[in-house]
């Protein structure tokens, strides 16, 4: 047989597969109706294990591993379909519908906003890009920003999540597991660092540089060019500038924002000390209540997957099948569980898209834990 004849043969088999798949899904639908009527769980681990063993035996040695992979996908699809039929729309989908109806059409211009650090921090700059007249409350840790929003002390909070040079702010992702919140907007801020010191200092005097760990990591090339300089981490770049002023030392410098020079009466020793000119930090704005403003085209969620081979692959296949672009995938260890991880994901899709709702329903019924974190747009 030539290649065209072989392709015709494959097309014929594929047509039969589609018919058989639809027939199988009709049976799955009837199973779902029975489980719903008899209050039975969707997932039956023993049944799935027996199925995998049976089809592997039927397949034979040559294709056994491929058949196991195929049927793991088929059972995953079947389980999701049953979940949708038995439970209806997911809690996340219902939350989205409610938020769209109840959220005002305009993003607020005035609000009480929690930021980490001190006046002059990049979080403040990000906040002022989002809100016209914010009343900012400063806190000494990221955890306290989450707590202030969770307790209702502040309406919103601003938190950095990733930098184009230094990567993700892992502490933020770890804290996400501990608090209930919703992301309502994000902002991408160009981050240009300066080296600040007290008046009278010169670059050759500097023996110690202080700043936030992320800022230090964004300026490694500049720092490597200095000799015998101690690096000390602190909570925030603005806090670092304030500490330099309070120290009175001429051998101490801070990597901080340019506005902090005037704010704290410091001298600029070097400008643009970040490793790359294209240095951006992404901040999120969080709220205790789910709010979805018009134009929301990004959605974030977190999930815990079954700890077995192929779990992440099967989730990724859903994105591909539905044509939804996954823009971020971050994994963080689960406290108390050896080498198991939570996965944080950002997708790019309009919140009004039925395809996105379908994906959320699929995920809620396909994973060990699913949590919707919000839908929002980004300010550049």
Image: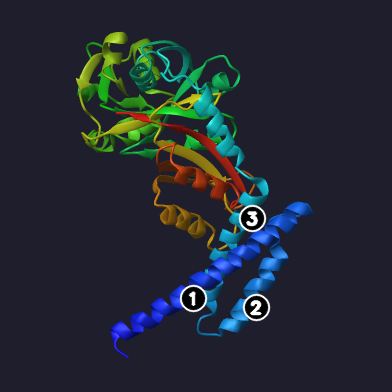
Compared to residue 98, the image places residue 348 above or below, namely below
Looking at the image, which is closer to me, 168 or 42? 42
Looking at the image, which is closer to me, 144 or 127? 127
In which quarter of the view is residue 179 placed? top right
Mark 2 vs mark 3, foreground winner is 3
Q: Earlier in the sequence, mark 1 or mark 2?
A: 1
Q: Residue 16, which numbered label?
A: 1
Q: Would you name the residue on which mark 3 appears?
A: 82
Between the C-alphas of marks 1 and 2, the distance is 21 Å
* SS under mark 2: helix
Tag 1: Cα neighbours inside 10 Å, few (<14), some, or many (≥20)? few
Q: Are marks 1 and 3 in contact (CB under 8 Å)?
A: no
Looking at the image, which is closer to me, 336 or 43? 43
Q: Earlier in the sequence, mark 1 or mark 3?
A: 1
Between the C-alphas of marks 2 and 3, the distance is 22 Å
Compared to residue 364, the image places residue 73 above or below, namely below
Q: How many marks?
A: 3
Q: Would you name the residue on which mark 2 appears?
A: 54
Q: Position of residue 134 (x, y in %)?
A: 41, 11
In which quarter of the view is residue 162 placed? top left
């Amino acid at each position: 047989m030539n290649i065209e004849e072989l392709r015709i043969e494959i097309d014929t088999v594929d047509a039969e597969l589609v018919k058989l798949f639809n027939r199988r899904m009709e049976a799955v639908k009837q199973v779902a109706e029975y489980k719903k009527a008899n209050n039975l769980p969707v997932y039956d681990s023993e049944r799935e294990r027996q199925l995998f063993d049976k089809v592997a035996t039927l397949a034979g040695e040559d294709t056994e591993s491929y058949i196991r992979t195929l049927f793991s996908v088929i059972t995953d699809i079947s389980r999701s379909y049953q979940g949708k039929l038995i439970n209806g729309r997911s809690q996340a989908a219902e939350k989205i519908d409610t938020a769209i109806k109840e959220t005002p059409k305009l993003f607020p211009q005035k609000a009480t906003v929690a930021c980490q650090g001190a006046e002059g921090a990049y979080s403040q700059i990000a906040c002022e890009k989002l809100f016209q007249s914010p009343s900012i409350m400063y806190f000494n840790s990221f955890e306290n920003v989450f707590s202030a929003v969770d307790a209702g002390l502040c309406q919103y909070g601003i938190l950095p999540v990733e930098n184009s040079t230094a990567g993700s702010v892992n502490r933020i992702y770890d804290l996400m597991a501990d608090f209930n919140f919703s992301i309502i907007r994000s902002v991408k801020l160009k981050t240009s660092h300066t080296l600040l010191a007290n008046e009278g200092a010169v670059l050759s005097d500097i023996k110690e540089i202080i700043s936030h760990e992320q800022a230090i990591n964004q300026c490694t090339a500049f720092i490597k060019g200095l000799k015998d300089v101690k690096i000390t981490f602190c909570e925030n770049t603005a806090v670092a500038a304030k500490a330099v002023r309070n120290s009175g030392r001429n051998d101490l410098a801070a990597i901080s924002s340019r506005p902090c020079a005037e704010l704290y009466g410091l001298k600029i020793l070097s400008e643009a000390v970040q490793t790359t000119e294209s240095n951006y930090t992404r901040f999120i704005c969080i709220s205790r209540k789910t709010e979805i403003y018009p134009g929301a085209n990004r959605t974030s969620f977190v999930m815990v997957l079954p700890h077995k081979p192929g779990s992440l692959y099967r989730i990724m296949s859903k994105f591909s099948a539905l044509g939804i672009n996954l823009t971020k995938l971050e994994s963080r260890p689960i406290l108390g569980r050896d080498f198991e991880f939570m996965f944080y994901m950002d997708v790019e899709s309009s919140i009004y898209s039925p395809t996105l709702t379908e994906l959320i329903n699929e995920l809620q019924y396909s994973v060990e834990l699913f949590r919707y974190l919000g839908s929002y747009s980004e300010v550049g």
